[in-house]
Amino acid sequence: MSIAIIAGIITLFFTTLLTIAGEGAAIILIPTFIALGIDIRVAMATALLLNSLAMIFACPRYIKNKLIMFKVGLPILIAAALCSPIGAYVSKKLDQQLLIVLFIGFLLFASGMMFLYRPQEKKQKEVEQSKTKEIVYGTSVGIIAGFMAGLLGVGGGNFILPMLVYLGFNPKKASATTAFIVIFSSFSGFLGHASVGNIEFNLLLFTAIGSVVGALIGSWLMSEKLKSNQVKLVIGSVLLAIAAKMIWNFFN
């Protein structure tokens, strides 16, 4: 019971932070749960389910504030789903350590871009007012993100969010749209892991409470309190932290 309570508190903190960045917290929660002594299969299945749960509670506020770009998000979902198996197939032919190094390099580049890149307001308006560009950009991002997610075995949100910002989309809308996509991508991953890993009721109960509360706080902060530049700083910090974690794992 005490482990479940601690896991719930940790889930609350990380879900709040990563919801602001439009990311699922599973990438941090899985190693954290394992460090608490939770079985890896249980940790992975639980964390992925929490990803979907958190974003389900975050998205109504985003929809209310018209932050989710459905014309961008739906092509990303479809293209990513089609291209992820291709990436997974290619990954079997390549050296995994090289892939990890490349992914770390991408995260460092993307985090630096979040801190330094300033898209012009004119570019944002041109992109978001063009239905053709929304569909084309969404499909292109989905192809790349889906392929890379399958290649590296990580969540596609790590690619989708910085790519959308780089293409000129408003950081808040990019974050909210990525959160919408995470609902489906994480639940799909959960179904795969749930078939081989059990769900512990006490762990799920306390972490689910932490996940829902964290998602509500994070979505409120992102949509109501933080400015676009502040959201970019949070996104950059999260990407940098993920890169640091992967570098630590790589050398240990």
Image (spheres, grey):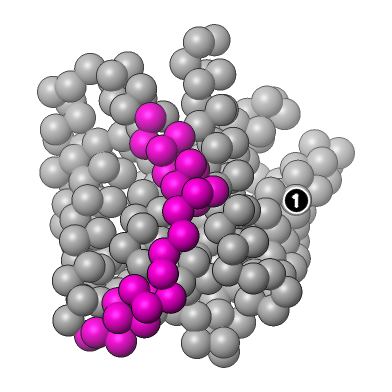
Q: Is residue 63 left or right of residue 192?
A: right
Q: Is residue 31 visible?
A: yes
Q: Quadrant of residue 138?
A: bottom left
Pinpoint residue 231: horizontal percent, then vertical percent. Answer: 60, 62
Pinpoint residue 161: horizontal percent, then vertical percent. Answer: 42, 57
Q: Is residue 156 left or right of residue 114?
A: left
Q: Quadrant of residue 182?
A: bottom left
Q: Residue drawn at (65%, 45%), measured in percent from left and top?
A: 200
Label the magenta part by its dominant secondary structure.
helix
SS assignment at label 1: helix
Tag 1: Cα neighbours inside 10 Å, few (<14), some, or many (≥20)? some
Q: Amino acid at mark 1?
A: Phe
Pinpoint residue 82: horizontal percent, then vertical percent. Answer: 16, 57
Q: Quadrant of residue 214?
A: bottom right
Q: Residue drawn at (69%, 79%), measured in percent from left and top?
A: 224
Pinpoint residue 70: horizontal percent, then vertical percent. Answer: 35, 80
Q: Is residue 206 left or right of residue 195?
A: right
Q: Nearer the viewer, residue 211 or 76?
A: 76
| Residue 171 vertical position relative to residue 135 in the rendered view, above or below | above
Q: Residue drawn at (56%, 28%), measured in percent from left and top?
A: 244
Residue identified by numbered label 1? 13
Q: Is residue 205 visible?
A: no
Q: Residue drawn at (14%, 35%), measured in percent from left and top?
A: 89
